Amino acid sequence: LFIPITLVVYLTLYYAQYLFSHKRSMYTEVKLALKMREFFLHYQPHVDASSGRVFGVEALVRWQHPVRGVVYPDVFIPLMEEYGLMNELTDYVLDTAYHDLVGKGFIDGKHLGINVPPGYLSDKKSIYLLKQYKQKFDDIGVSLGLEITERQFLDDAACESISRLRASGVDILIDDFGTGQTSLSVLEQTNIDYLKIDKCFVDSIGHQSVNTPVLNAIINLANELDVGIIAEGVETDLQAQYLLTQGVTLHQGYLYAKPTLIDELYLSDGE
Ligand code: C2E
Ligand code: MG
Ligand code: MG
Ligand code: MG
């Protein structure tokens, strides 16, 4: 009993200091936010634009800051990377997603994309945990996929983990495809399930931009490799129509839905 009481007192004091101190460090703030469970998830559908059916959802983390309100990942993820807290955040997101989705019948049969930094995959403990979550999500009818960003380097250990996870049935998606430097070597070394085409290529549709020929080349590459494609950041009908004429049917973007809380998610079954 002594230890829990000490812990509660300690945390309360810590939290009070955190709220009112002008000198609090960002590290303390972010670390404490994990402990206080101030992060939560929004979900954004991946839609099959040829049928209107929802294929799956991506989990996107947000920070409910006690003073500043909702803080978006582009603000705190670079900090957490710097502080070496990304593995802890990823564990947290997996756990939160599971608790959000358990008991939600409408998610049955859908895919779930979790963003995973490459560094997470070099850690043996994470691979063990991911396999456990794969089983837990299977049990509630959800197919787990990992969105691995292409902006950071995938080392050999990470590539090996990718192969092992994929063999256990986890989908592998390469996120922000086309913006990193390792794209082609990664495709050579590992089998993957989907490429997510970065928004900057979708943005170029309808504009005179070098990104449109690159977009077409990425689509051809994915087709040649027999890898699925998800287009992200689809905002206009023009973009959606163009992608459909190129055979890209899985879309994610504000045209279909903005990221929302799980209970505000409306998953149409098409028609
Ligand atoms: P991402 O994985 O490429 O996620 C897509 C981002 O594009 C999301 O921003 C989403 O809200 C935004 N988006 C989707 N459709 C549209 C659209 O039509 N227009 C515009 N303007 N934006 C759109 P968000 O939620 O701010 O996330 C930014 C990035 O932060 C993500 O990019 C991902 O790299 C990272 N991130 C988010 N959640 C997590 C997480 O749980 N773990 C990790 N490791 N990274 C995360
Ligand atoms: Mg993503
Ligand atoms: Mg993405
Ligand atoms: Mg992106």
Image (spheres, rainbow, N blue to C red):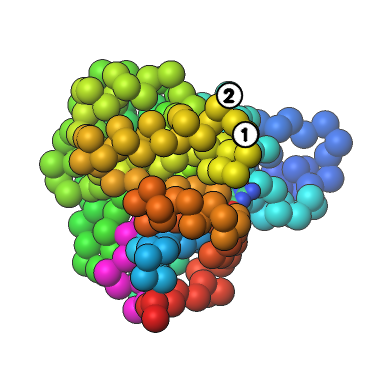
Q: Is residue 2 shown above or below 119?
A: below
Is residue 28 visible in the rendered structure shown here? no
The percent coordinates of residue 96 (x first, y second) are 45, 58
Q: Is mark 1 within 8 Å of ligand 1?
A: no
The residue most toward the left is 167
Q: Residue at x 71, y 32 (%)?
A: 26
- Which quadrant of the view contains residue 49? bottom left
Q: Is residue 123 left or right of residue 175?
A: left
Circle 1 or circle 2, nearest the eye? 1
The percent coordinates of residue 246 (x first, y second) are 38, 48
Q: Residues within 10 Å of mark 1 (few under 14, many from 20)?
A: few
Q: Residue at x 38, y 33 (%)?
A: 218
Q: Is residue 236 shown above or below 83?
A: below
Label 2: which residue? 82
Q: Is residue 63 left or right of residue 181?
A: right
The percent coordinates of residue 31 (x first, y second) are 59, 38
Q: Residue at x 39, y 81 (%)?
A: 271
Q: Nearer the viewer, residue 211 or 234?
A: 211
Is residue 215 visible in the rendered structure shown here? yes
**The residue tagged with tag 1: helix, strand or loop?**
loop
What's the magenta region? 104-113
- Which quadrant of the view contains residue 87? top left
Q: Residue at x 27, y 59 (%)?
A: 143
**Kind of residue at badge 1:** Gln
Work out how far the residue at label 1 is from the one at label 2, CA to CA, in angstroms: 37 Å
Q: Residues within 10 Å of mark 2 (few under 14, many from 20)?
A: few
- Residue 208's disc number: 1
| Count of marks, rendered view | 2
**Kind of residue at badge 2:** Glu
Q: Is residue 157 left or right of residue 269?
A: left
